[in-house]
Amino acid sequence: MSDSISFDHPSIVFFESELFRRIQLEALFNDSKTICDATPRSSWKEVVEQYERHKSLANFSLVAFVDSHFTLPADIELNDSTAKVTLKEYIQQLWPKLIRQPDRKDTMSTLLALEHSYIVPGGRFREIYYWDSYFTALGLNQSGYTHLIKDMVLNFIELQERLGCIPNGNRSYYFSRSQPPVLGMMVELCVNHDNAPDTEFVLRCIEGMEQEHRFWMRNEDKLINGGEAAERVVRMPCGAILNRYWDNLATPRTESYLEDIELARNLPQEQRAEFYRNIRAACESGWDFSSRWLADSHELASIETTEIVPVDLNCLLYRLERNLAKYHGLLNHHDQAAHFNARADARKEAIDRYFWSDQEQFYFDYQFIKQQPLNVRSLAATLPLFVDIASAQQARSVKSTLMSTFLQEGGLLTTLNATSQQWDSPNGWAPLHWFAVIGLRNYGYKEDARNVMQRWLKTVDAHFIKSGNIMEKYNVHSLDSLADGGEYEVQQGFGWTNGVTLAFYDLLT
C-alpha cells in the first residue's frame, strides 16, 4: 500500500513523445481525448520507435501512421428511445449498457484494469469517474444493483492502494489527481443497505477511507505559518487546516493537450506551469470549468484554482471525518473515533469562520492568498446543509437565496454568472441538485425540496420525450434550449443524471 502518488505505465513513453505532441498539435482528431484512449497495435514503446524511424521519409503521412498503428476507441452508443417507455423504465434499460465486467489484466490501452464490475457515465467517457460514481450509485441502489456499488467501492480502494490516491478516472493519464472525496458516502450506501454489514468489508473500507484522508492531508505537518500551503492542505490565518484542489503535475492535460497549449499561448513562459496546474486542479474539483475558479469570470486563462479554499471540498472532508469516527465507533475503536471527531469539530469551526458571510447571508469560497472570500454565488453553498453543519438561521438564509435567485423553470442554476463555462449559468447538473435537495430536507424544507425535484424531473423528462436521450447537464433557464459551454459536446448516457433522477422519484413517493 502506498500513501504517495507514484505511477509507471507503458503509455507514459508515448505521452512524452514527439509523436503524441504532433498528433495533438496537428489536431488529427476533433476530441483530444480520442488518441489518449486509443490502443496501440504493438507496444507503446514500439510505436514510438517506429515513428522515429519513419518520420523523416519523404512519403511519411502522420494520418496514415496513426491509422496503421492504433485502434481508435468508439463512443458508447445508446440507442434513442423510440418505444413508448417512461423515463424511469428507460433508465432501467440503460444500466446493462453502462455496466462493465472486470477488465483483462493484459490490456494494451491506457485503461487501468479493475478487478470488479463497474459502471461508466456514457458518451466519450468510456471509463469510471470517481465522484460521478456516487451519484450513479444512488440510482443503482434504487434498481437492485447494490452488489455493483460494493464492487465499485472495492475498485476505488484497490486503485488507491496501487496509485496512492483514488484517481479522477481509471486511465493512466489521470493518476496525478483525484476528485471530490465521496468514498465514505458510497460506503454509507453499502452499509445502510445491509442489515448486518460484513465486518471484513467495513474494516477494508475504513482502511480505504483513512488512506484517502491521508492523501488529502499530506504535508499538513510542514505548514507552520498561516497562509502557507502544500499540495492539498492550507493553513488558514487562525492556524486551522483546510483543503484545496491540486494536481501533482504542472503540464498540459494529456486528454486536452491542444486546448491547454492554445490557452497558455499568450501567457508569459514563466506563468504557464502554474496555469496548467490550475487547469488540472479544476478538473480535480469536478467543476471543470466554472467562474468559481477564475479571477476574470469570462477568461479561462485567469484560472486560479489552487489559490482557492472551496467550501464544498471541505464539507465533504468533514463528512469523511465524521464517517471515519462513526465506523471506528461501531467497531469499538474509541481512540480512533475520538481522533476523527476532533478533526471534524475543528474543520466545522473553520468552515463557519471562513466560508459564511454574515453580510451576504450565504456561503462563499475563500481566496487564501488575498485572505478574503470570493464573490461568486454557487450551489457549493448547499454543502454545509448537505453535511448538516449549518445553523438553523444559516440554512434558512441559504434556502431563501436558492428559492428566490437560483431556482429557474427547469431547476437550480449552478452559479449566477452567465459565462461560456459549463459549470455556470444557465446550466444545471444532477449532482448539485442532489446536494441541494438533501440539504433542504435536512433542515425541514421538504416542500422547497419537492419543488426543486419536480422542476428537475420535468426538465429531464421533457428532453427525454423530445430526444429519447438523457443528458449530462441541462439548461435550466429554458426547457427549449440545450445546455452549452465546456470543451466537448453535451454527452448522452448519463450515469449521474440517471442516478439522481431515480433517487428523486423515490423521495417523491
Image (cartoon, rainbow, N blue to C red):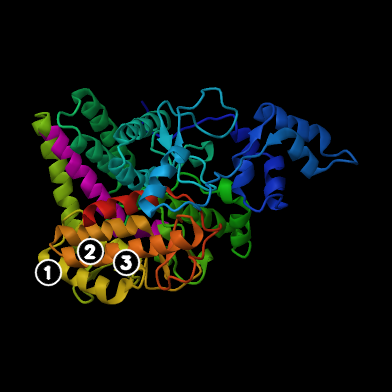
Picture coordinates of residue 200 (x, y %)?
22, 23
Q: Where does label 2 land, which residue?
A: 450
- Of residues 191 and 446, the one nearer the viewer is 446
Q: Where does label 3 land, which residue?
A: 455
**Residue that extends furthest to the right in the rendered view of this protein:** 58
**What is the tally of numbered marks visible in this picture?**
3
Question: Is residue 373 left or right of 420 when viewed as pictured?
Answer: left
Q: Quadrant of the N terminus?
A: top left
Q: CA distance from mark 2 to mark 3?
A: 9 Å
Pointer 2 local density, CA inside 10 Å: few below 14, some 14–19, many at least 20: some
Majority secondary structure in the magenta region: helix
Q: CA distance from mark 1 to mark 2?
A: 21 Å
Q: Earlier in the sequence, mark 1 or mark 3?
A: 1
Q: Where does label 1 land, which residue?
A: 393
Secondary structure under the numbered disc 3 in the rendered image? helix
Picture coordinates of residue 134 (x, y %)?
33, 44
Q: Is residue 312 magenta?
A: yes
Vertical position of residue 461 compared to residue 3: above or below: below
Q: Amino acid at mark 3?
A: Arg
- Of residues 151 and 24, the one nearer the viewer is 151
The range drawn in magenta is: 306-329
Q: Earlier in the sequence, mark 2 or mark 3?
A: 2
Pointer 1 local density, CA inside 10 Å: few below 14, some 14–19, many at least 20: few
Q: Amino acid at mark 1?
A: Gln
Vertical position of residue 76 compared to residue 390: above or below: above
